[in-house]
Amino acid sequence: EVQLQASGGGLVQSGGSLRLSCAISGFTFDYYAVAWFRQAPGKEREGVSCYSSRDDNTYYADSVKGRFTISTDNAPNTVYLSMNSLEPEDTAVYYCAATPVDGFKLPLIKDLHEDEYDYWGQGTLVTVSS
């Protein structure tokens, strides 16, 4: 059984930093993607970042480029999201997700389409105060 467990959320002041972690178990695929999504109050869930082992590359939403960094070990056992220069607009529940990836799925994975992800963790709340 695949399980994802997100942690690391909390309250931080604007301009501050946080690092989210997602512990993954039972997930063994040669090619995979791991990602972070977020859902702000009253808004739809949106993609933040992903890593694809299919092309060994990382992808980011425009709103977080240069501020957030996704990283993972090779298993993957843990996925991290390092968030710097946080803004009140980053306040949201953050979710980690994972999925196996084939060549057909990769374009959708790169565009952070949440429907392409098969496995999800529970959310962790990040609150950025102004």
Image (spheres, rainbow, N blue to C red):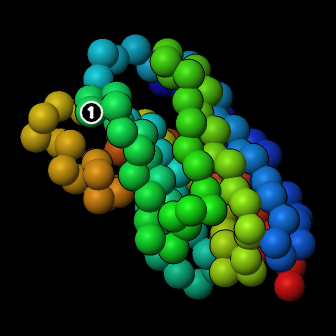
Residue 53, compared with residue 111, is above or below; it is above
Q: For the C terminus, which image quadrant?
A: bottom right
Residue type, numbered disc 1:
Asp
User: Within the image, what quadrant is residue 3 found in?
Assistant: top right
User: Within the image, what quadrant is residue 62 found in?
Assistant: bottom left
Residue 30 location, x and y as percent?
A: 30, 16
- Report if residue 23 is visible in the image: yes
Residue 86, compared with residue 88, is above or below; it is above
Mark 1 crowdedness (10 Å alpha carbons): few <14, some 14-19, many ≥20: few
Give the secondary structure at mark 1.
Answer: loop
Residue 85 location, x and y as percent?
A: 74, 68
User: Within the image, what quadrant is residue 93 found in?
Assistant: bottom right
Which residue appears farthest toward the front when viewing the image?
Answer: 66
Q: At x 69% / y 38%, what residue is drawn? A: 21
- Report if residue 45 is visible in the image: no
Residue that carries the numbered disc 1 in the rendered image:
55
Residue 44 location, x and y as percent?
A: 47, 76
Looking at the image, residue 10 sits to the left or right of residue 53; the answer is right
Q: At x 84% / y 65%, what residue is drawn? A: 16
Looking at the image, residue 125 sits to the left or right of residue 102; the answer is right
Q: How many marks overall?
A: 1
Q: At x 20% / y 43%, what residue is drawn? A: 106
Residue 99 location, x and y as percent?
A: 35, 35
Looking at the image, residue 14 sits to the left or right of residue 82; the answer is right
